[in-house]
Image (cartoon, rainbow, N blue to C red):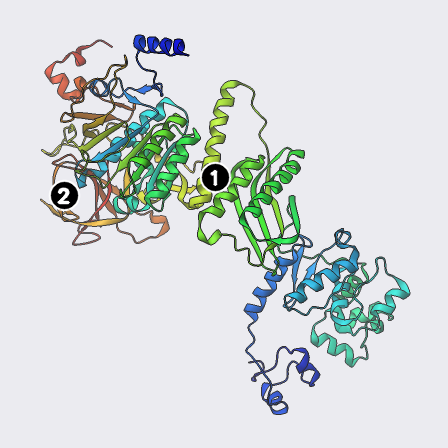
Amino acid sequence: MARLRRAVEEIEARSGPAETHAPGARLSLNRTLDRALGGGLSGDALHEIVPATPGDGGAAMGFALALAARFMAEHSAAGLLMAEDFAARDMGALYGPGLVAHGLELGRLVFVRAPDATALFQAMEEALKSGAPAVVVGEVWRLQKYDLAVSRRLLLAARSGRAPALLVQASAYRAADRISSAAETRFEISAAPSAHLPSAGSERGLPGRPAFAARLVKARLTSARGSPIGLDATRVIRLTWRSEDKQFDEPSISLPLVAASAYGSRAARAPG
Amino acid sequence: MIRNARRLVCLDANAARLGLSAGLTLADARARHPALVACEADPAAEAKLLERLADACARYTPLVALDSADGLMLDVSGVAHLFGGEAGLLAEIEARFERQGFGIALGLADSPRAAWALARYSNRRIAPAGLAGKAFAKLFHEMPVAALGLEEADAADMARAGLRRIGDLAMRPRAPIAARFGVEVLARLDALNGLERDAISPRFAAPDFCAERRFASPIAHVDAVMATLARLADDLVVLLERQAKGARLVELMLYRVDGDVRRIRVGAGRPLNEARAIARLFVERLAGGAEDEIDAGFGVDLMRLSCLVAEPLEPSQREWERAFEAERAAKLADLLDRLSARLGPSRVTRQTLVDAHIPEQAVAAAPAVRGEMRARGEGLGLYLPAEAPSRPLRLFERPEPIETLAEIPDGPPLRFRWRRVLHEVAAIEGPERIAAPWWRRLDAPTRDYFRAEDASGRRYWLYREGLYGRETQRAKWFLHGVFG
């Protein structure tokens, strides 16, 4: 027995402590964000998305749905969009044509409405555990019921079903740094001015692609090689969503193409 | 009020003994017997009660029909031996109804018409099978012609012609009777004979598959009900498997001792043939809302699980790849069934695009339990992912009015106030003009939609209602949706 213990200790000394959870596949978002996240967003955990101010609810949902579209591009399974009744009443219901325009496949989406937060968490947990969906997005309004235990249950359900959970906390603005939960990452999202397209008739341009300013408030970070890396919670990352190819723009090509050609950048001169 | 007076409609046995009769005015009756207790007739409530009794009778046979305002017709072909013969069946029915305080008259015969006549116009209850000739004449020929179920006026006509009993009609040549009273009379006579068969129209179609358990003593515990449910599901699955079918719509009926019947229906997104999956649907439903809780009352003494809609199972797919896909799809269908059972089908939906320009009609939602939706159009191809989304992520059910400031009345706004917050418009695109379809002749004003982005990057979908100068002089502005 003692010999066995020693053997285990030796192995652990050589290759680090045994992990209870082997890290699953990570989803790459874009270069900047991947570096901040240590290789991408894990596909079997709970991620929280919080708007920065009351007016950023739309942006937070837009970011969450962009992530959902990325996850759904990876798997052919369905995506579940769940919301508390109150959220839909206050901020409007999710709108099919808008979701299509945002890069989601409407035929693969299922919409679930829960009468209250408890029912929402229960439904999310069950959906995650079943292993059926590619992603579960939940929008919760009343956060009194959301605590360490509930978030831990969601996290474990995500692990066992190998599906990511994205929880949009619509009413938690300005509280992103104070929430305590078992979530793996937490983003604070605010709207960002889009790259305006030139307008023919007026000085004001046309609104461009959806843009977000994301602040990574919390992350259980380990790099792909296993060593923990630092988290810069004050850094704001600007993201632009390209809905047609379901990707966040790389910062280097986020300039509008017209402007880029005027500067004679490499992007415009590249052959092909 | 019948014929300008309050009249007696129904009497109990005591009143009948006193010589009162239905149709008598209340004033006359009160004059004869001042102590008469009368209460208002309520045909609607009576009809409802009769329907509940019909449901309770479904314990004997699935084919139960309502018969006029005060009768029930049960098709008991091939059922009687389960209750110890025809006499046993009648005794059982009578005992059950008597316990609940109903007095009933029973009749059982080869044809519905004969059973009806026996119940209402005879002391005998059972007409032996294959009755004909003299025996038939003995049983039926003494009955009044009303036992044929004729209109009162017709019966009175016949009485004037001296035809009072069924025998008077049956012994006479048919042609003159048909000529004078119509062929209907002869048809009724044939139906009585069993020569012509009246169809009864049951309240509910008989299920294709059903399993049931009777209990010697009633059960009242939810656990016992659940355990029985699991075993019933096992039985049902065996029946379904024989035909390689799966259940899409399942109904559980709980017959209470006091005559009440509880029906619980659940639907499934794909044909189910696993007992556990079927039982689980009910567990979700019973654990869900307070309205669905089992009220066992004095106990349940019969449970029946029937499959109302069955569909052939899809042939199992062999390849691994497909098996994996199918497993995920099956898991999803199970998940959606459970969620729909708990939250209600209207809360678990799918959406499809519809070919319509009006934004709120461009999408249709349907319960996800019904399985995949058939696309109802391509949605006009307006919403393909492009440079910038043309439609908002969220749409308000009711567009919210906003105050705007614009350079010119029909131009795009410079700034607007929504929910008491002022937004400076930094970028704007529009108008996209959407008018109500003229062929529907709706008088809804035309809308000019704008996509506006404010200084901090929030994007909104605004519209101006009414064409300036043509439809309205003072255009109203609304905020209809929010972009991501």
Q: Secondary structure at mark 2?
A: loop
Determine whether, in the image, residue B51 is placed left or right of residue A234: right
Examine the rendered structure and indicate whether residue A268 appears above or below residue B249. Answer: above
Q: Earlier in the sequence, mark 2 or mark 1?
A: 1
**CB atoms of marks 2 and 1 within 8 Å:** no
Mark 1 lies on residue: B337
Determine whether, in the image, residue B108 is placed left or right of residue B271: right
Q: Are marks 2 and 1 on the same chain?
A: yes
Q: Secondary structure at mark 1?
A: helix
Determine whether, in the image, residue B348 is placed left or right of residue B436: right
Mark 2 lies on residue: B411
- Picture coordinates of residue B483 (x, y %)? 23, 37
Q: Which of B68 and A264 lies nearest the eye of the viewer?
A: B68
- Picture coordinates of residue B263 (x, y %)? 56, 52
- Residue at (64% x, 46% y) in the render: B207
Q: Which of B84 and B385 lies nearest the eye of the viewer?
A: B84
- The chain letter for the residue carrying disc 2 is B
- Residue at (60% x, 39% y) in the render: B310
Amino acid found under the numbered disc labelled 2: Gly
- Picture coordinates of residue A172 (x, y %)? 21, 39
* Circle 2 residues within 10 Å: few <14, some 14–19, many ≥20: few
Amino acid found under the numbered disc labelled 1: Asp
* Circle 1 residues within 10 Å: few <14, some 14–19, many ≥20: many
Q: Which mark is residue B92?
A: none
To which quarter of the image does residue B391 belong?
top left
